[in-house]
Image (cartoon, rainbow, N blue to C red):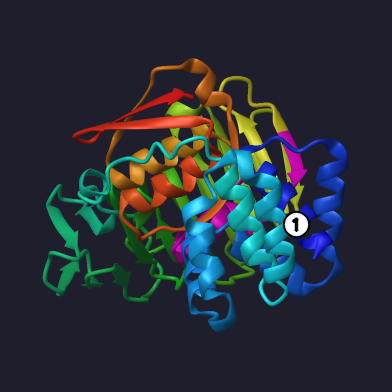
Amino acid sequence: MKEAFEIARIIQKSLKGKLSESEERQLSGWRKVSDENERAFQRMISEDFYTIGMEKLEMYDSRVAYGRFLQKKYQQRRKRRFLINMARVAAVALPFVIALVLYVGLNREEEQMVRPSLASNILPGTSKAVLTLANGQMIPLGKEATDSTIITDGTQISASGSGVTYASGVESESVVYNKLEIPRGGEFCLTLSDGTRVWLNSETSIQYPVAFGAKERRVFVQGEAYFEVAKDAKKPFTVQFMSSSVTVLGTSFNIRAYPEEKRSQTTLAEGSVRIYSPGSSMLLKPGEQAEVSALSGEMVKQEVEVKNFTSWKDGRFVFEQQSLEDIMRTLERWYDIRVIFKDEGAKRISLSGNMKRYGDFSQVMKMLQMTGDVRFELHGNDVYITTE
């Protein structure tokens, strides 16, 4: 039980980005002990853990009375020692639940929550895109559009509510490009004529051939996209973005290249890729990421947890020791909101979390405000952020 409270304390500090080096080693070591510990960690940093934990305490028959007492008393800082001692006696069956509930609850001076009635009006993104054909015709696609079949430049295009698919066909001598644009608050899937699948995040565009030529497969991306490239040893697949490009034969990788961020990130999930920038190149292995400066072209390679950079396509936001500025930039695009930092210091706060991508904005705010270090004010679709 003592270990449960110690790990809960460290996880609470982890959510605030305030771990010491020794605590980081302790948490990392505990996570590596077993798969069960790692799963417990992922549950404890999810946005619904606190709520579910309290519900479990209520449902646990022999602990009902204590659970109700805890809910009423956890904010009274004068009684911390008493509550923790009581928890040690009463929480043998649910050590991590009660431990984290205590440490999260007792570390909240006062919950400065965005009013749910307001934040719940801000909804997550949906499937939507605009397809521009070679002749300039623009076709709205997505959840609100009807399924359709389009014939253009000798190729059949099938459009559904969540994606668009180009029929496989013969190689083309003259390469004709289409463009797919995903607005703020949107996402979409694209299947190219060679079978390559592309998941496109909010505020992203991709230009690609209706049918690939005989020598290469080349597309152009701005924004964020996850690729599962169909294998073709005779015809390499190249993605161009900013001042860089990635060449592969068949693999899975994520590219994040928003111009306003002034840097790009290529994260490799499977296979291998070679990334090029002016004057240099770099080979990546699974679990590695190349970050390229848009200004200097300088490349830096590092090992990363791939899911932290690819979970968006699977319906999750995963942040690990990420600055609040970067987190809010991602949320701005997905929820189509505007974020204003009234305190520049708030941008540098580091946070960790694992939350659902399809929940309304109030759920995200509850998770972020667990840190107790920042306060959010909502005016329409404008979110103002200050430090406590």
Q: Quadrant of residue 223?
A: top left
**Vertical arrangement, residue 55 with respect to residue 380, above or below:** below
| Foreground residue among 386 and 238 | 386
In screen coordinates, is 179 left or right of 283?
left
Residue 231 at least partly seen: yes
Q: Give the vertical position of 297 relative to 194 (above or below).
A: above
Residue placed at 16% from the left, 70% from the top?
A: 150
Residue 220 visible to an observer of this rendering: no
Which quarter of the image is occupied by the N terminus?
Answer: bottom right
Three-letter amino acid code of the residue under disc 1 = Phe
316 drawn magenta: yes
Farthest bottom residue in view = 61
* Percent coordinates x, y for residue 111 in the rendering: 43, 40
Quarter-of-image position of residue 348: top right
Out of 132 and 90, give the one closest to the viewer. Answer: 90
Please state the total of marks drawn on the protein image.
1
Verify whether residue 9 appears in magenta.
no
Q: Residue at x 77, y 62 (%)?
A: 4
203, 209: nearer the viewer: 203
| Residue at the (81%, 45%) spot, across then down | 24
Start-end of magenta stretch = 300-322
Label 1: which residue?
5
Q: Is residue 319 above or below residue 59?
A: above
